[in-house]
Image (cartoon, helix red, strand yellow):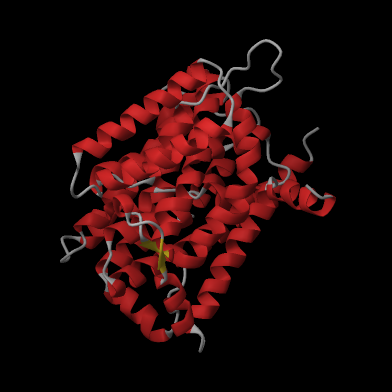
Amino acid sequence: MTAPVRRYVDYLRVEQVGGLVLLVAAAIALVLANSPASDWYEDLRGVTFGPDTLGARLDVAHWASDGLLAVFFFVVGLEVKRELVIGELTDRRTAALPVIAALGGIVVPALVYLAVAGGAPGSGRGWAVPTATDIAFALAVLAVAGAAAPVGLRLFLLSLAVVDDLGAIALIAALYTETLRLLPLLGAAALLGLYWLAQRRRITTPLLYVPLAIAAWLCVHDSGVHATVAGVAFGLLTRVRPDDGEEHGPAERLEHRLQPWSAGLVVPVFAFTAAGVSVSTDAFGAALDDRAAVAVLVALLLGKFLGVLGASWLAVRTGLARLPERVGWVDLAGVAALAGTGFTVSLLLARLAFPEPERGAAVTLAVLVASVVASVVGAVILRIRRHAHAHVV
């Protein structure tokens, strides 16, 4: 690896850079979708390729959401496993706050969505869309706006987003599996078992793991379960604790190697294929006329804020959890606002819940607007607290 490439890879490990690349990819998609090149952009998203085996001949948009995002969710699974085994989530009382906050950030937005959508035709499947928090986007805003914030606040947001995404993955598997084929599912389970055994036997060669991962992905995809579930399953089965003589365990090594690919390629490509919707006056009018889109907007902005902050307050008030050191309620309010940046996973859920082009575009626009507003509100709150933290020695 040359020195410039190595520097670029190192930059992608910085949260601000990963979030910036994500925003640039989404911005390019929006520009193309609202320019004379819109037909070219749509044709590009519709290009199909891949083997016909196990239904793996997909268009570019589905390769991004079903294929590339499996790598993103693999990194998420590695992060979850590491936090559970040797990270912040090992201490029950410390872990309780972000876990309870994440549950509040899933349940309350879903209820707000259902209250606003109110049984509008075809809107019932969309309640999961506002339950997700984008890790890269939210952490990038926190890193910029809350540069002087306590370490505990970043760990709170990271743990919350990780648990949040785990919940979203469970919802993807439970809600958007229309037909379940048992034989491919059993094949995927057998391959995952082989991966777990290889990890326990300390096998390290990619000559085993790469074909194993591809085969498992194909089986999960053919089973009817969303293929990204394969990614998080592999992550959760990866060994975390290093053996004697190992500086880092396999999970940490893989996360270090794959995180730049996830931040620099996987998530931006998905954002490029998913965020390209019309932002004309007519498009905004159509979104405002669509109860599902309005419900997603309100749930991400209001439901996430109330759910995360309210659940955190209840957990601390009842003694189930405690606030991280030097973290106050205004800090938590800023993070609660940032939790409304659904972006990557919310866009995926929107694609699954509303496959119809018109309604899908309206809900996608709602997710994008809510994510931008939530990040701005969260950044403002965190900037207010920045001076207070900067003067703490």
Taking depth in this image into account, of 208 and 33 the one nearest to the observer is: 208
Taking depth in this image into account, of 221 and 53 the one nearest to the observer is: 53
**The quadrant where residue 13 appears:** top right
Residue shown at 23% from the left, 47% from the top: 177
Query: In the picture provided, is 363 more to the left or to the right than 178?
Result: right
Spot occupied by residue 134 in the image (x, y as percentages of width and height) = 50, 50
Query: In the picture provided, is 382 more to the left or to the right than 148?
Result: left
Answer above or below: position of 125 versus 76. below
Residue shown at 52% from the left, 20% from the top: 85
Q: Dividing the image into 4 quarters, which one contains the C terminus?
A: top right
Residue shown at 19% from the left, 37% from the top: 182
Spot occupied by residue 197 in the image (x, y as percentages of width and height) = 44, 19
* Residue 107 in view (yes/no): no
Spot occupied by residue 157 in the image (x, y as percentages of width and height) = 55, 40
Spot occupied by residue 320 in the image (x, y as percentages of width and height) = 42, 22
The extreme right residue here reads 3
Answer above or below: position of 329 versus 66. above
Residue shown at 62% from the left, 22% from the top: 249
The extreme bottom residue here reads 36
* Residue 60 in view (yes/no): yes
